[in-house]
Amino acid sequence: MATKANGNGTKDENLYHIVFSISNIPKDPNLAIEKLRICGTFTDLPAAKAAAHKTLFEAGYEREWFTEYDTNETDFEIHHIKRKSGLCVFAKSGDGTTFRVSVATTPNTQGFESNPEDHKVHGDVFHVVQTIVLYDEDDSGEARETIVEAHLKKYEDARKFASTVLLAPEDGVTKESFAEYDEAGPTEKDCGYGENVVVHAVGGNGENLLVSVLKGQEMESVRLAEAAMRIRSFN
């Protein structure tokens, strides 16, 4: 239940984040790199879902550009689409690029407030996101889970939190518990496993674990970035 806060905004027990991912298995057979963005955070689930369904179009894409475009949970089941958790939009382009727009729910532990008119959190939000690539289920890397672990107001705090996500010293889980463990240096923004990925590890069953720090983006910046990417793709 949303409540008034400071007379100029609303806050809620939960936050709802729009997670926008782009991958291309034909061009990247091991699915090593997946572009991940958080395109808005809301305090109201219906508002978040409505925004999620507009994300691809606000990013500058047109319906005709996609050979597949599904927004129905029943279709996700019929087509055996993986990664259905929170999925609102699944689309594919003619060159095999896959687009997913999902809504992830987290507790509003930092007391973020939203604009009462659009229920959106305005201002900087830094998200700590863990991606688990389940190679034991699908060696293409298509089977994966994306979890928003935390959202903080400063990059430094998010980066500090990210370095602890995979570790639990009190339970005996340390860096040495993993077959591989890589972490970006103090002045680096990634550790060589994708944009914004600051921690990469390989578990005992071969699963790859990626921890990213992502700054929430306004749709205008996403639209410009996607336009630049499309220009590079066709040149």
Image (spheres, grey):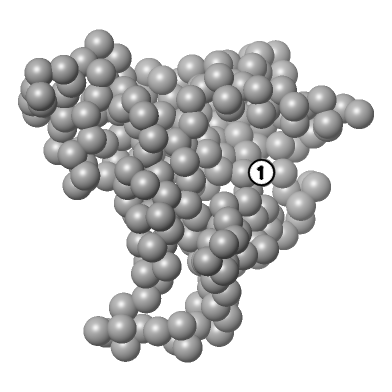
Drawn side of residue 67 relative to residue 190, left or right: right
On-image quarter of the C terminus: top right
Picture quadrant where residue 88 is located: top left
**Residue found at the very far front of the displayed protein:** 187
> Residue 8: x, y in percent?
16, 17
Query: What residue is at 21 percent from the left and 15 percent from the top?
Result: 116
Image vertical order of residue 189 relative to residue 178, above or below: above
Picture quadrant where residue 56 is located: top right
Work out whether residue 220 can be spotted. Answer: yes
The amino acid beneath tag 1 is Ser
Query: What residue is at 57 percent from the left and 62 percent from the top?
Result: 187
Between 56 and 118, the residue placed more toward the observer is 118
Judge the density around disc 1: few (<14), some (14-19), many (≥20) Cα neighbours within 10 Å: many
> Residue 210: x, y in percent?
52, 62
Work out whether residue 138 can be spotted. Answer: no
Query: What residue is at 27 percent from the left and 45 percent from the top?
Result: 106
> Residue 226: x, y in percent?
67, 27
Drawn side of residue 173 relative to residue 186, left or right: left
**Residue found at the very far top of the displayed protein:** 117
Kind of element beneath mark 1: strand
Query: What residue is at 57 percent from the left and 16 percent from the top?
Result: 57
Residue where numbered disc 1 is placed? 23
Drawn side of residue 69 relative to residue 132, left or right: right
Image vertical order of residue 151 relative to residue 53, above or below: below
Image vertical order of residue 108 relative to residue 122, above or below: below
